Every structure is written in C-alpha cells, then in structure tokens.
C-alpha cells in the first residue's frame, strides 16, 4: 500500500477544476503542491528540478482531469503523475549516466562536517546516493511501491529494483552505522522534522 496522501480532497473541488474554475484549480494546487514537491524533491535530489516537475505535473493534471474516474482518489492520481515525470528526468541522458556506485561519495561524506542529528545524517546520506538508487529507496521504503511497480515505472527488471535497494541500504548502513536500523526514522522535510515512513533494512 502506498503512503497516505493526507487530508482527503473534496470531490466538488475536483469537479470545479475539471469544469475550468480557476479558483478550484488554485485551491487544488494549494492542497497538493507541497506534498508533490517533497516527493519529487526526494526522488530527484534537486529543488530546481523538483520545481520544474511540479509545474509539469499540474499542467498534465489539469489537462487530463477528464480521465480521472474517481474524484476521491485525486491525491494518489496526482502523485503517480508526479512520480512518472520525476522518473522521466532520471531516464534523461544527462542524469542517467550516474547509475554506477560511487564509494567516494560516501567517503567524502564521512569526512565532511555533517550535523549529528539522525535526521540530518540521514538527509546527507540519502542525498549522496546515486539518483536511481535514491529514487528506489524513496519509492520502496517511504511511498510503499512494490519492486514490480518500481520496475514497471523505470522500465527495468524486478531484480534491478531489488539490487539497487539492497546496495543503497548497504551504503546507508555503512555511513550511519548502528543508527541505521529497522525503526521509524524522522526525516527532515523541507526544514521540518516529520516522520514520513519507515526505512527498512533487508
């Protein structure tokens, strides 16, 4: 099951947005934009790219609202569009080059001055992961996607998703040591510490 998408959206708001109401569209954007931005920021590791994907996502959302069959499911539908758009960035030629492991990233991280809180350390470690690995970690551990779903989204095999997750967990354990375990971890969420999920070791 995927991560909960927050407060339910009033279907009447969705209907208004579908009908072209600018106020309804603005309200829908306000209700969902923060969560969508955080999601794509975690996948892409870049605020500027996340801003671009956020805007592209809502252009697609408002263009395709007629295709939404269950207005109560709007939040999950929007997040799926955002994930697809974020992953399309990862498949682009300039980003996808960084898919091989880079141990020096974690060596440099270990020698750098990093805040000592668990949240800050986890943030730094996640940001040091290769783009594809970070995306798999976030989708599987936090968003609740299955390996099959991740494989389908990325156009890769299930074994690819599993191996990326396994290697990412190994690198996170290497950096975080005993503090990295199967437990609820508070992750800094755009400046606010918010428990958003469970990072699991497998």
Image: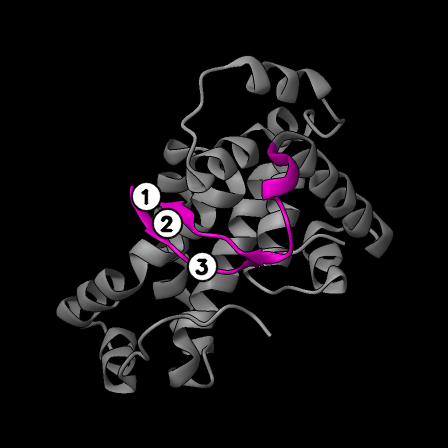
How would you rate the neighbour count of disc 2 (Cα within 10 Å): few for under 14, some for 14-19, many for 20 or more?
Answer: many
What whole-number distance in Å separates the C-alpha atoms at marks 1 and 3? 12 Å
What whole-number distance in Å separates the C-alpha atoms at marks 3 and 2? 14 Å
Dot 1 and dot 2 residues touching (CB under 8 Å): yes
Q: Secondary structure at mark 2?
A: helix
Is residue 92 visible in the rendered structure shown here?
A: no
How would you rate the neighbour count of disc 3 (Cα within 10 Å): few for under 14, some for 14-19, many for 20 or more?
Answer: some
| Residue 118 position in % (x across, y down) | 46, 40
Residue behind mark 3: 196
Quarter of the image for the C terminus: give it: bottom right
Question: Is 139 on the left or on the right of 171, as rendered?
Answer: left
Residue behind mark 2: 37
| Residue 108 position in % (x across, y down) | 59, 14
| Residue 8 position in % (x across, y down) | 33, 80
Q: At 18% from the left edge and 72% from the top edge, which residue is drawn?
A: 24
Verify whether residue 154 appears in magenta.
Answer: no
The magenta stretch is 176-199
Residue behind mark 1: 190
| Dot 1 or dot 3, earlier in sequence | 1
Frontmost of labels 3 and 2 is 3
Question: Is 200 on the left or on the right of 202, as rendered?
Answer: left
Question: Which color mode does the image show?
Answer: one colour
Q: At 39% from the left edge and 63% from the top edge, which residue is drawn?
A: 61
Q: At 28% from the left edge and 82% from the top edge, which residue is drawn?
A: 15
Q: Secondary structure at mark 1?
A: loop
Q: Which mark is residue 169?
A: none
Frontmost of labels 1 and 2 is 1
């Amino acid at each position: 099951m995927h991560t909960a998408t927050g407060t339910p959206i009033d279907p009447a708001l969705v209907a208004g947005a579908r009908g072209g109401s600018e106020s309804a569209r603005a309200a829908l954007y306000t209700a969902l934009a923060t969560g969508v931005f955080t999601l794509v920021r975690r996948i892409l590791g870049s605020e500027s790219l996340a801003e671009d994907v956020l805007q592209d996502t809502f252009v697609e959302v408002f263009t395709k609202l007629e295709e939404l069959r269950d207005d109560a499911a709007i939040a999950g539908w929007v997040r799926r569009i955002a994930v697809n758009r974020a992953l399309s960035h990862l498949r682009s030629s300039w980003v996808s080059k960084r898919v091989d492991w880079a141990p020096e990233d974690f060596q440099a991280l270990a020698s750098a001055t990093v805040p000592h809180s668990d949240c800050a350390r986890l943030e730094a470690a996640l940001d040091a992961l290769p783009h594809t690995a970070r995306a798999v970690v976030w989708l599987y551990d936090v968003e609740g996607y299955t390996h099959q779903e991740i494989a389908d989204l990325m156009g890769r095999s299930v074994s690819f998703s599993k191996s990326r997750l396994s290697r990412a967990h190994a690198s996170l354990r290497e950096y975080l040591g005993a503090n990295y375990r199967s437990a609820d971890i508070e992750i800094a969420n755009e400046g606010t510490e918010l428990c958003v999920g469970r990072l699991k070791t497998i």
